[in-house]
Structure formats: C-alpha cells, structure tokens
Amino acid sequence: MRANELKPGMAVNLDGKLYVCVKTDHVKPGKGPAYVQAKLRGVDGSGMAERRFNTDAVIDGATLDRREMEYLYSDASGATFMDTDDYEQHIIPENVLGDSLLFVRPNASCTILFSDGTPVSLELPSAVDLVIADTPPGIKGATATNQMKEATCDTGLKTKVPPFIVTGETIRVSTDDGSYISRVKAE
C-alpha cells in the first residue's frame, strides 16, 4: 500500500516489527514534497514511534482480524472483553489499549483488532456519546462569551464543555482529541 493510504487502525510491518497506526497527518510544506507524518504503536509493547513517509512510498501492510466484542469491566489485570460470537472472555492489558478505554462505556459493543490471535488494538468510531458524571454549575449570563468549563465523563475522560451542560447530561465527544462536539438530545 502507498503511504498516503495509511489511516488510524491499520497495521504495518516496518523493520521486521508490527505496528498499529494511531494517527496520521498529511503535510504539504510550502517548499519541498508532501509527506505523511504517522504516529505508530508497537504491538510488542515497545511504545510509540513517529515516522515520516513520502506520499508515494510503498509500505508493507499487515492484515488484522476484526472481532465484535463487548466491554465488560476493568481491573488490575486489564480490561475484560467478551466475544459476542462464542462468549469467550479476553483480558486485554492496559498498555495495548492506551487511552482508548476512556471512550468506551461498560457493556458497549466495540471492535477489537487481532493479529495471530493476540489482541493489538481497539478500533474507535469518530465520535462517542458519554454521560457527564461531574461538572461545576454554569454561571448565569455566561453564554455571551465562548467560555468552557471542565467536565468529567462517566468513563473518566476529562473534557471542556459549554457552561449550559449539567451533570447527568449526555454529550457527543470526538475520539481523536477528546473534545466536545455537541449535546445529545434525549429520545
């Protein structure tokens, strides 16, 4: 595959190691050719790596198995997921999941990526709906300015929300940077 086709969640083989792409940026500098800046996480637990590729460079892609699983709970040994097909439970260590667990509520269905039977990553949608667990009360008349206040979601994610958001309300959050997108209307 070409470097400009690289997207978050894809797996690549570089220097004999398997990496999962976490983030990509397509950069077009004013001088010189365009390139892809990729943030990669080593599947073997070796940590994060930043690589820069020419847009027309050829990268050795790897195929990952995608399985629908239900997130059950987290404890000291890691996060426990249940396969929705055969009800087998898998414990995935925290270092494999990283911060992505902050966007997943218990009993939520999600896609886990496997390589040779080993879980390597959690695939997130572009946005998720979370419930505000704690936020200070809004200030009356503060709607005239673009002020944001700190809020903690039910998963532990901390984000900035507008002053009219109250505790117990459901909001939509971007999984790219954890930022507030909108309020979710109750149905």
Image (spheres, grey):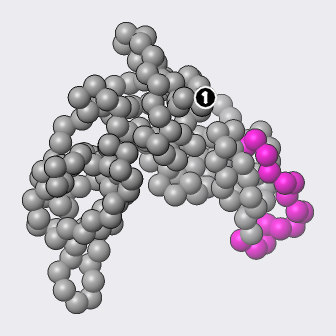
On screen, 118 above or below 177?
A: above
- Quick one: 6 or 52, which is closer to the camera? 52
Residue 137 is covered by the magenta coloring: yes
Left or right: 66 as drawn, with respect to 103: left
Check disc 1 and report its element: helix, strand or loop.
strand
Residue 48: horizontal and vertical position, in percent?
38, 56
Q: Which residue is mark 1?
A: 75
Mark 1 is surrounded, within 10 Å at the Cα level, by few (under 14), some (14 to 19) or many (20 or more) other residues, namely: few
Residue 11: horizontal and vertical position, in percent?
24, 45
Left or right: 168 as drawn, with respect to 140: left
- Quick one: 157 or 146, which is closer to the camera? 157
Q: Amino acid at mark 1?
A: Asp
Q: Residue at x 25, y 69 (%)?
A: 52
Question: Which residues lie in the magenta part?
Answer: 131-146
Residue 98: horizontal and vertical position, in percent?
48, 45
On screen, 142 above or below 59?
A: below
Q: Residue at x 84, y 54 (%)?
A: 136
